Structure formats: C-alpha cells, structure tokens
Image (tube, grey):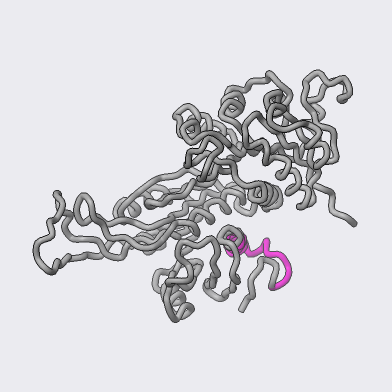
Amino acid sequence: MAETPRRILLGVTGGIAAYKSPDVVRRLRERGAEVQVVMTPSAREFVAPLTFQAVSGREVRESLWDAAAEAAMGHIELARWAEAVLIAPATAEFLARLTHGRADDLLATLCLATTAPVFVAPAMNRAMWANPATQDNVKILQGRGITVLGPARGEQACGEVGEGRMLEPAEIAERLMQHLTCEPVLAGSRVVVSAGPTRERIDPVRYISNRSSGKMGYAVAQAAREAGADVVLVSGPVALTPPSGVHVVRVESAAEMHAAVLQAVNGADVYIGAAAVADYTPSVIHPQKLKKQADTLTLELVRAPDVLAEVAALRPRPFVVGFAAETEQLEAYARSKLERKALDLIAANLVGDETGFDRDDNALLLLWPGGQATLPQDSKLSLARQLVRRIALLRSPEQAPAGREALGGSLA
C-alpha cells in the first residue's frame, strides 16, 4: 500500500529570494510531498503564479475572497488541509505581521487558523535580520512553537555579505521533512546539552582553546528538540546559529561552563556533554597584555573543573551522556572514560587533521554498560538523531523496537 503524501502548504512572501521558492516546491515533491502554494500580493512582483502551478500541479491560492474555495472560506479550508505550513521566503515584514497576529491577507489568516506546525525560512538583508525588532519577533515566534529554519550566512542580492540569506531549497525541504517524520521520543523531557570549546584566558588578548567547532553539540540540541524535548544549550564561543526553539546560555571559560551546566541540570532528565571543556586553565590571568621580552615564556596551568564527572556524581542525577574525542585506541579510551566517570552512555569519535574537527560529517562509536553500537560516517545531524533515539531507548528499554538494527548502527 502506497504511503499517503505529506500535505505541505508553502507560503511565498515578497522578497527577492522568492525566485528560489519554485525549487522548494520541487524538492518537497521529490520527497513525496503534495504542495499547495499560497502567495501574498507582493510575492507576485517576483514570481508569476503560473510558475508555481507548473511545478506543484495545483492552482495557486492568493485571495481571502476566492469564490471557488470551499464555501468561500479559503483560509479555513487550507488550514484544515495542511499537515505543515512553510513560509519560504519569510520576509521581515511578514515575520512582524505573524508576530502581531495580523489577518490581512490569505497567508497570514491561515497561519492563525491552522493547528498544523508552522515553519518559517527567513530571507532579508543582514542589517534587517540583525535589527532588534526582527530578533525580538523571531524570539516571540519561537516561544509560540514556530520553527525557524535558518537563515544562512552568505552573499546577498544587495551585494552585501552576512547572515540573512535564505537556506537553500534542498536543505529547507530536508529539514522540514525530518521534523515531520521525527518521533517525539523525548516528549516531556528536559534536556541540557553543552557544546563548543572553552577559552581559558591568559591576558586580555590571549587564551588557550581547542579546535572544537560546536557543530556536533548543536546538532544534538536540534535533534533533541525535534524529538519533543525542552532543550537548554550551554554553548562555548562558536560561529553557529542556534537551533530553533532551544534556550541558549552562552559561556566562555571552563569555570563559566561548569557553573552554567550545574545550574541548568537542576531538574533535568538528560545531560549530554558534547562540549570540549578545557582540562587545564592558567593559574593566573594577567590583567594587562603580556609583552614579548624573554625568549621563552612559562605558563602554570591548573586543573579545570570536570563538568561531566560532577554532573554524573549528582544525586539525584539526570541520564548522563559524555563524548570522547580520541586520536588513537578509540574504544579502549572511551570505555575507560565511561566506567571511570560512571556515565550512562558515551559517544566516541576519532579526531585529527582530517577527521572530526570542523566538519559536517562524522562517525560515532556508542558505548554503554552492557552494549555498544557503531554509527557509520554520516552527517552530524543524522548521527545526532540516531544518538537521541538510542538515549530514549536506554532510558525506556520497555519501548525498544524489535530487531537489533531498529535504531541504526551495528550492535555488538
């Protein structure tokens, strides 16, 4: 029996990125979706409705007063039909109208009338995106459960470079469909994720750090949010956009990471320590810049707080997941860390000049008391989703699906 297509309503607003929206339709249809396009009046200035009709196979809807719609109540008809509403591009003007609950055109009205999840893919000039009014609107929308996809950083139609560029159509389609197919295995849970490096100050301009990009931790936070969890992301200094719907606490040093995590895990169900927290920190932070004088410089380092071990030692404590980045003897070192720190699960990966660091893909070895699984090379987001499913399984083994391969990876 053929699977029923997912019903996606694509709203197109009046921004230059609307020229990419027909490709969004095509990418969604490639993934088995049925797509109904709704355009705002200003969107017509960029792309003709006939283009969308050709790629979607459905007549484009534009007006609240469409006599051909069901009892002339087009917004109600469309709101009932859609399994998800996607606005791509979502201009600054439309985000503002959505925030204030305006119902002055068909698209805005059906966003109020639908009970389906709403997704927005912002697209605007970098200054418009950074404007406090836009940022406040985005935070309000996220607080109401609307998922924000992007924006990306790159060259813009105005010739400037920065954050505000709409995500590419393939990525929008993939992320939307992943949201719709993700099982809420962590629904009702509170999850704390730590991500990124720490910086240990030497003086006002110098610090000790590591090569962590934070990409794996941010992917884990996104996967946990997709799985229905209330997520707190404690992030070291990274150049990444936080996942939609995640509360972010920004820190810099190991001491700050330690304090923020211990505060966040109070009452949490799961802690996932993906951050690369410094093992050592300078014993003295010099108040002024050190001058280059002698041929050598000796720094005294002292042990930094062991965040993962302290969370694992709490009573009561959350389900504790650690990460191990190793250059050799991956399983032996990871298993030692699992046992030494009394973790519930550890995710280990090899790192070096060609692997692990600042990449969008990875491979993981998962170890837990009594079992292990190998997750082969894949995108970090895909690995994060598999990790989240494994966490849900280990926390609730009675809900385990049948079969050794049900959650992906090869079990040993």
Taking the view exactly as shown, the residue that stands out farthest to the front is 159
Q: Residue placed at 46% from the left, 32% from the top? A: 127
Taking the view exactly as shown, the residue that stands out farthest to the left is 294
In-front residue for pair 3/14: 14
Q: Is residue 388 magenta?
A: yes
Q: Residue placed at 62% from the left, 34% from the top? A: 16
Question: Which quadrant: the C terminus?
Answer: bottom right
Whether residue 370 sits left or right of residue 2 in the image: it is: left
Please tell me whether residue 125 is drawn above or below residue 329 in the rendered image: above
In-front residue for pair 313/283: 283
Please tell me whether residue 65 is drawn above or below residue 43 in the rendered image: above
What residue span does the magenta drawing correspond to? Answer: 386-404
Q: Is residue 214 visible?
A: yes
Query: Looking at the picture, how far across and down is residue 43, in whole percent?
Result: 69, 28
Q: Quadrant of residue 98?
A: top right
Q: Quadrant of residue 83?
A: top right
Looking at the rendered structure, the number of numbered marks drawn on it comes to 0
Question: Which quadrant: the N terminus?
Answer: bottom right
Q: Residue placed at 52% from the left, 73% from the top? A: 369
Whether residue 73 sits left or right of residue 280 in the image: it is: right
Q: Is residue 142 visible?
A: no
Q: Quadrant of residue 411?
A: bottom right
In-front residue for pair 325/387: 325
Query: Looking at the picture, how far across and down is residue 25, in whole percent?
Result: 75, 43
Q: Is residue 163 magenta?
A: no
Query: Looking at the picture, how far across and down is residue 286, in whole percent?
Result: 15, 53
Query: Looking at the picture, how far across and down is residue 239, in whole percent?
Result: 43, 50
Q: Dominant secondary structure of the magenta stretch?
A: helix
